[in-house]
Amino acid sequence: QLLKKLESFISKYYKNLLLKGALYFVAASLLFFITISAIEHFGNFGVFIRTFLFWLLIIVNSIIVWKWILVPLKGLYRIGESLSHQEAARIIGEHFPKVQDKLLNLLQLTSLSAEENELVHASIQQKSKGLSSISFSKAIDFSENKKHLKYTLFPIGILLFLFFSGNKIVLTESSARILSHNTHFEPTAPLNL
């Protein structure tokens, strides 16, 4: 039962990382997209620089997706390396200081219990009862991610401002030119009044 509680904690730990990562992904991707589009809008670059900006956008977004989305997903579904029970016990111990040593000792005893030593088995049972009332999942608080929400709201605010102020052309035309980075575009002539 203790191992099930640890597994539940590990799942919640990775779900929390995934939630935080999703917020960071949206914020960083949008901000980078806005920056690249603004640079292209004001620079009106040629094919070479637009191709560079296109691939820079792809590479940066790929790194962001890998670090903040795929790595937590791998951990959540236990693909490759993920959080071990001992590492989870250390994280739980940071939130419940009285638990850390007991939990780590219990995990060490569990690995010895394969030999079916009666004394070890009795000690495991005793220590498990002492930890059964503690909900390890409470060490993870999803509401702490509210503080990361401001990073997402900032680029969304910029997008809304550009669209409602009538300046969406800064993003739409320049991003279309970046997506068609191999096409030559004639610079627009300035308006003469």
Image (spheres, rainbow, N blue to C red):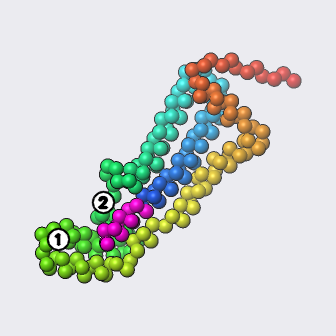
Indicate which disc residue 149 carries: none
What span is in magenta? Answer: 1-12
Secondary element under disc 1, as helix, strand or loop, is helix
**Quadrant placement of the N terminus:** bottom left
Snapshot quadrant of residue 186: top right
Task: Please indicate whether residue 132 sits to the left or right of residue 165 in the image.
Answer: left
Q: Is residue 49 visible?
A: no
- Residue at mark 2 to residue at mark 1: CA–CA distance: 18 Å
Residue 7: give x, y in percent of width and height: 35, 64
Residue 158: give x, y in percent of width and height: 68, 45
Nearer the observer: mark 2 or 1; the answer is 1
Q: On screen, 55 above or below 2?
A: above
Residue at left 30%, top 63%? Answer: 85
Task: Please indicate whether residue 44 sits to the left or right of residue 13 in the image.
Answer: right
Amino acid found under the numbered disc labelled 2:
Ser
Residue 107: give x, y in percent of width and height: 25, 69
Secondary element under disc 2, as helix, strand or loop, is loop
Q: Nearer the viewer, residue 140 or 43?
A: 140
Q: First in sequence: mark 2 or mark 1?
A: 2
Q: Which residue is mark 1?
A: 113
Amino acid found under the numbered disc labelled 1:
Ser
Task: Please indicate whether residue 64 sits to the left or right of residue 150 in the image.
Answer: left
3 falls in the magenta region: yes
**Quadrant placement of the C terminus:** top right
Residue at left 68%, top 49%? Answer: 157
Residue 88: give x, y in percent of width and height: 34, 64
Residue at left 36%, top 69%? Answer: 5
Q: Which residue is mark 2?
A: 84
Residue at left 29%, top 73%? Answer: 103
Is most of the magenta stretch helix, strand or loop?
A: helix
41 falls in the magenta region: no
